[in-house]
Amino acid sequence: MAADAVPIAARFSTFRRWPAARQQNRNCLVPCASFGSSCHDGDSLPQGAYFSTQQEFISSDRARQTQNGPRREGHQSIGEVTMASNVCVLGAGRMGSSIARTLLDRGYPTWVWNRTAAKCDPLAALGANVAPSVEDGIRAADVVIINVLDYAASDALLKRDCIASALAGKAVVQLTSGSPRLAREEARWVEAHGAGYLDGAIMATPDFIGKPETALLYSGSRDVYEKHKPLLFALGGGTSYVGELPGQASALDTALLTQMWGGLFGALQGMAVAEAEGLDLATFRSHLSAFKPVVDAALFDLVDRTNARRFAGDDATLASLGAHYSAFQHLLEACEDRGLDAAMPRAMDMIFRQALSLGRMEDDFASLAPLFRNGSSRQSGEPANA
Ligand code: NAP
């Protein structure tokens, strides 16, 4: 059996919204209301929601395979029966819909739920089962993927008694963006209710989900990661496991985005300077490519030196802190001369000055790194630990 396949018995409590034509001739179907779900998110079930038997599910699955060619990765043959992990995707916004579409495309039996139910319709047309409530979606699934706006929205969906009691034995994969602290808190709550927890960060836009190069970062339960690797890699071939501490994927996401924002904010300041001096932005843009290898080399050098704590200037230093600071003065001057906003350059100037006051003129640019580790040291004027 595939690592993420489930026993047949677990599949008998599945439901699906049947197209009107199939409702005319349904066999072995039990109205959903008899399922006993205790906290439907809407008061009544959507019209056409029924539970099917395992046999029904397998039949429809076989039909899909015959129609769509060879067996896809979400399925594994056990004798005559085709098996796969059941997945529930909570949230059918841009990203959640893309995740669900990708899973359906790879052959995973997929349940979807969204606050605004109409957003599930295009997914139902692709073969998704529309869950009438969060609880029903979770009960039907082995793997629960959450992708809503933020953790507040996720908490509102999950942190209820009826959900807590449905979680035991499930794998919860949280793909909603959040901070490391939120990931830690979520892991504690999910694990306390008997489920495995994996926190993920999606390093891509929805159109990249399912591509070989797409990176998703995961941290938390290694067991969940290993067991559901095929499913996780279906969402992005560049998937990686960052570490067992639940907040680590979010931390790496934040660290990488911080580097990106630094570059983007820098570009905004640079474009203001260029335009104020009569350069058009096409000229600015055309010179970015030639400069990029130099910037990239400096970036990797900074990371390597910081990792090795090699802060003192040496033969391999690309430019001393003093040389950087001297060139940096031209930015301050350009802003002042042309009346440009200088809030960001002034903040950078403060960091330079702090390091220079500590006698780091001949040191490497990496010698600024300790100042970022202890926010209170700058405020109090104490030297940072090098
Ligand atoms: P989106 O299109 O705006 O979708 C937001 C989703 O959250 C919708 O399903 C929405 O339901 C749901 N939602 C919002 N508030 C809710 C609440 N109080 N209760 C229940 N559901 C609620 O956003 P998205 O782009 O898909 O982003 C979803 C998550 O993926 C975010 O955490 C985002 O940071 C992350 N992400 C997105 C991208 C990207 O490029 N889009 C990239 C990486 C990570 P309704 O449809 O009912 O409003």
Image (tube, helix red, strand yellow):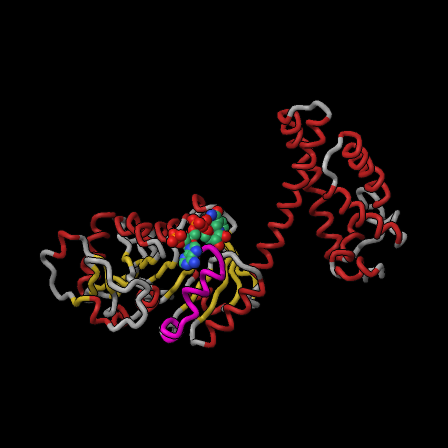
Q: Where's the N terminus, which quadrant? A: bottom left
Q: Main secondary structure of the magenta part?
A: helix
Q: Is residue 66 left or right of residue 255?
A: left
Q: Residue furthest left?
A: 25
Q: Is residue 342 above or below residue 47?
A: above
Q: Nearer the viewer, residue 262 or 63?
A: 262
In the rendered image, residue 197, in percent from the top left (x then y), is placed at 47, 68
Q: Is residue 38 above or below residue 148?
A: below
Is 156 colored magenta in this rendering? yes
Q: Where's the C terminus, which quadrant? A: bottom right
Residue 252 appears anywhere in the view? yes
Q: Is residue 114 left or right of residue 258?
A: left
In the rendered image, residue 282, in percent from the top left (x then y), is placed at 62, 25
Q: Nearer the viewer, residue 310 or 161?
A: 161
Is 143 colored magenta in this rendering? no
Q: State how many labels appear.
A: 0
Q: Quadrant of residue 384?
A: bottom right
In the rendered image, residue 142, in percent from the top left (x then y), is placed at 35, 67
Residue beneath the point at 66% across and 28% down: 284
Residue beneath the point at 33% across and 50% down: 119
For the record, the magenta segment spans 149-165
In the rendered image, residue 130, in percent from the top left (x then y), is placed at 28, 57
Q: Is residue 53 left or right of residue 330?
A: left
Residue 99 appears anywhere in the view? no
Q: Nearer the viewer, residue 107 or 252?
A: 252
Q: Is residue 355 left or right of residue 297?
A: right
Residue beneath the point at 23% across and 71% down: 35
